[in-house]
């Protein structure tokens, strides 16, 4: 019954930080897993910080327990990247609830 709620396709990216020969630090993202999730909108507002408009949207992604995701992972949903803020694993229901925030970089 839970599988019918996983309707939205998402992609999970892992980020790696490398140091180049010139000494600069670069962050690269590589696709690690594609799956489906139940997406819920928690909240978001529009605010002005340092003369810049910020829209900090927060979403929940509910996925299966076996999907590999870490605190340093990124989730791509509807061509937008979301930074993982917390992962709550529920072994009784065999699911993970991932709380994310929209990235404006």
Image (cartoon, helix red, strand yellow):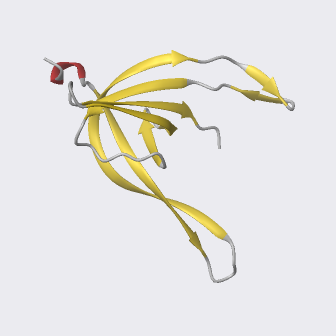
The image position of residue 77, as x and y in percent, is 42, 34
Give whichever of 102, 70 is nearer the camera: 70
The image position of residue 74, as x and y in percent, is 46, 45
The image quarter containing residue 56 is top right
- Up the image or down, 31 lies above or below 61; here it is below
Q: Is residue 53 left or right of residue 28?
A: right
Give whichever of 8, 90 is nearer the camera: 90
Please give the count of numbered marks on the rendered protein.
0
Residue at left offset 56%, top offset 33%: 102
The image quarter containing residue 51 is top right
The image position of residue 62, as x and y in percent, is 33, 27
The image quadrant where one finds the C terminus is: top right
Q: Is residue 56 left or right of residue 83?
A: right
Residue at left offset 50%, top offset 17%: 42
Residue at left offset 76%, top offset 27%: 53
The image quarter containing residue 21 is bottom right
Residue furthest to the left in view is: 1
The image quadrant where one finds the N terminus is: top left
Residue furthest to the bottom in view is: 21
The image position of residue 95, as x and y in percent, is 26, 30
Q: Is residue 81 left or right of residue 65?
A: right
Residue furthest to the front in view is: 92
Residue at left offset 34%, top offset 37%: 10
- Up the image or down, 9 lies above or below 22; here it is above
């Amino acid at each position: 019954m839970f599988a019918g709620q996983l309707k939205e396709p998402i992609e999970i990216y892992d980020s790696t930080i490398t140091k180049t020969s010139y000494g600069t630090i670069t962050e690269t993202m590589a696709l690690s897993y594609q799956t489906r999730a139940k997406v819920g909108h928690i909240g978001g507002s529009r605010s002005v910080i340092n003369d810049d408009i910020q829209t900090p949207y927060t979403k929940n992604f509910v996925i299966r327990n076996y999907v590999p995701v870490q605190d340093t992972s990124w989730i791509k949903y509807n061509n937008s990247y979301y930074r993982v803020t917390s992962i709550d694993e529920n072994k009784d229901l065999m699911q993970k609830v991932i709380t994310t925030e929209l990235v404006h970089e």
